[in-house]
Image (tube, rainbow, N blue to C red):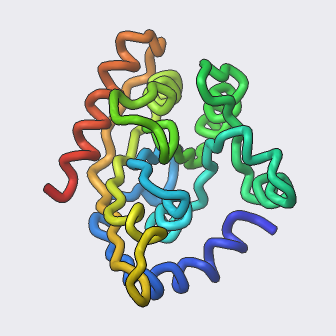
Amino acid sequence: MSYEAYRRPLTPVVRAAYRLEVRGIKHVPTDGSLVVVANHESILDPFILSASIPRPIRYLAKSELWNVPLLPWWLASVEAIPVERGKSDVAAIAQAIAALEAGEVVGLFPEGGVMRREGPWLRGAARMALATGTPILPVRLLETRRALGSRSFGFPRLAALIGEPISVSRTAPTPELARELTDLLQEVVEELGT
């Protein structure tokens, strides 16, 4: 099965269950390569993001997920890209760059994980965008942490706020440029909806 084979039937279920409000859908380019970045508060985030963005997304996912029974098959079917956390995973970045150069959408959560302490975001999204000249689509997900921890009956209302794409010129992704772009991304995402 493909990404779309999962996304199409699950999107109406996710949207209905969480009364998902998607704002800024007009900002999503209908074609061409795109890096989608969002904040990361819950393991639900990829499903909420997929229900909000009407294009197939190749996610970068922590490589440990490939050790969970049955998950490798599913991750392969949605063409997820494994990334080794805690180091600069050159192979994962190269695979994501190849997907972008083929006109695909790559999604990632620059916070680095739902349990990660607060601080500056990781630079992978910026590095890929700079290396390919791909625009970055900022998305802020609201209330997803509460969605799994809610003790109340039913599901909390969730929202995805989509900002305008950030144009990126193709250039060598130096650490300095990647940090500057990453800091801008973090600021833009955090300011969405405020």
Inspect this view and state whether residue 95 appears.
Answer: yes
Inspect this view and state whether residue 34 appears.
Answer: no
Does residue 68 appear to the left or right of 161 in the view shown? right
Query: Of 95 and 82, which appears nearest the observer?
Result: 82
Q: Position of residue 20 (x, y in %)?
A: 38, 77
Q: Which quarter shows the C terminus?
A: bottom left
Q: Which quarter shows the N terminus?
A: bottom right
Q: Position of residue 115 (x, y in %)?
A: 48, 44
Does residue 109 appear to the left or right of 70 in the view shown? left
| Image vertical order of residue 164 relative to residue 16, above or below | above
| Image vertical order of residue 115 relative to residue 73, above or below | above
Does residue 51 appear to the left or right of 58 in the view shown? left
**For the point 38% across and 84% down, which residue is it?**
152
Does residue 130 appear to the left or right of 60 in the view shown? left
Query: Of 73 and 1, which appears nearest the observer?
Result: 73
Q: Position of residue 78 (x, y in %)?
A: 73, 58
Q: Position of residue 88 (x, y in %)?
A: 60, 19
**For the point 34% across and 27% down, which residue is it?**
120
Residue 64 is drawn in which quadrant?
top right
Residue 77 is drawn in which quadrant?
bottom right
Query: Of 146 and 9, which appears nearest the observer?
Result: 146
**For the point 44% across and 69% down, which residue is it?**
149
**For the point 47% across and 15% down, which residue is it?**
173
Residue furthest to the left: 194
Number of marks in the rendered image: 0
| Image vertical order of residue 95 relative to residue 178, above or below | below
